[in-house]
């Protein structure tokens, strides 16, 4: 029986992909558009990876240039400023997921494990009025795999009673690495991974 649920954020609780696409285009607007387009393809395929990884990918893999940790943080901060401004609109909430969370948060242990920046993530959840539904909210720069491992250790959760709900291959890999159940929320491209959820209107664990 599932007692604990680890939630991805982007694409599961908040419909943010288009806004985050725009954010990457904006912080890299001085670079070649063809390279930006390649970054966006990588970004969409790897929704669970942090912006820190994606910024490094843009420079090291696409531009073929080195980038310092300080420069990565500088770009990440620019990205975060844009996200804090654009993603606090409640119209971006995924209503069937949020309704399920609000109705069931007292019946399960809910946590967020996301590839989004942790401080930004906590800010957005508070501004959107949904932070009270979660025992804790965790994000990057710590990897999702490590976030899950840490939660299992800190709370001494039994693996057979915990699951991760996400919408990317990175979410599946984090669940698989920690030997917990994975639920794929409404992403046909990873239909062969985990247990599929189309919506939460009639969902029961």
Image: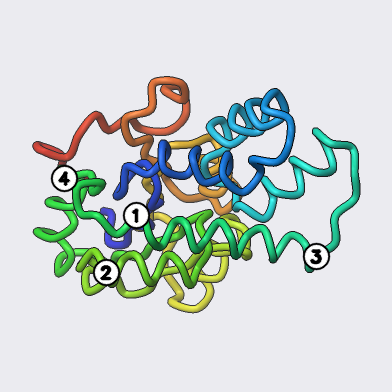
- Give me the residue at 63% from left, 32% from top: 42
- Give me the residue at 50% from left, 57% from top: 116
The label number, if any, that marks residue 151 in the structure image: none
Disc 2: which residue: 127
Q: CA distance from mark 4 to mark 2?
A: 16 Å
Camera-nearest residue between 34 and 13: 34
Disc 3: which residue: 69
Q: Residues within 10 Å of mark 2 (few under 14, many from 20)?
A: some
In the picture shown, does residue 26 fall above or below 78?
above
- Mark closer to the observer (3, 4): 3
In the picture shown, does residue 168 fall above or below 148?
above
- Give me the residue at 62% from left, 65% from top: 142
- Mark closer to the observer (4, 1): 1
Q: Secondary structure at mark 3?
A: helix
In the picture shown, does residue 128 fall above or below 202?
below
Q: Secondary structure at mark 4?
A: helix
Please tell me how many numbered marks the rendered image carries: 4
Snapshot quadrant of residue 89: bottom left
């Amino acid at each position: 029986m599932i007692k604990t649920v680890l939630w991805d954020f982007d694409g599961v609780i908040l419909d943010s992909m288009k806004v985050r696409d725009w954010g990457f285009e904006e912080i890299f607007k001085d670079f070649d558009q063809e390279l930006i387009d390649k970054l966006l393809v990588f970004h969409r395929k790897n929704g669970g990876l942090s912006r820190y990884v994606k910024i490094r990918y843009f420079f090291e893999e696409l531009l073929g240039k080195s980038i310092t940790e300080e420069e990565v943080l500088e770009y990440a901060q620019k990205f975060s400023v844009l996200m804090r401004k654009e993603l606090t609109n409640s119209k971006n909430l995924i209503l069937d997921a949020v309704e399920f969370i609000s109705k069931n948060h007292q019946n399960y242990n809910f946590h967020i494990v996301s590839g989004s920046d942790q401080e930004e993530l906590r800010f957005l959840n508070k501004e959107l009025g949904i932070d009270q539904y979660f025992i804790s909210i965790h994000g990057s720069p710590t990897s999702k795999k490590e976030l899950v491992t840490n939660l299992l250790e800190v709370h001494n959760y039994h693996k057979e009673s915990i699951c991760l709900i996400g919408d990317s291959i990175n979410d599946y890999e984090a669940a698989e690495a920690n030997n917990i159940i994975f639920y794929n929320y409404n992403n046909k491209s990873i239909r062969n991974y985990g247990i599929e959820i189309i919506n939460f209107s009639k969902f029961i664990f």
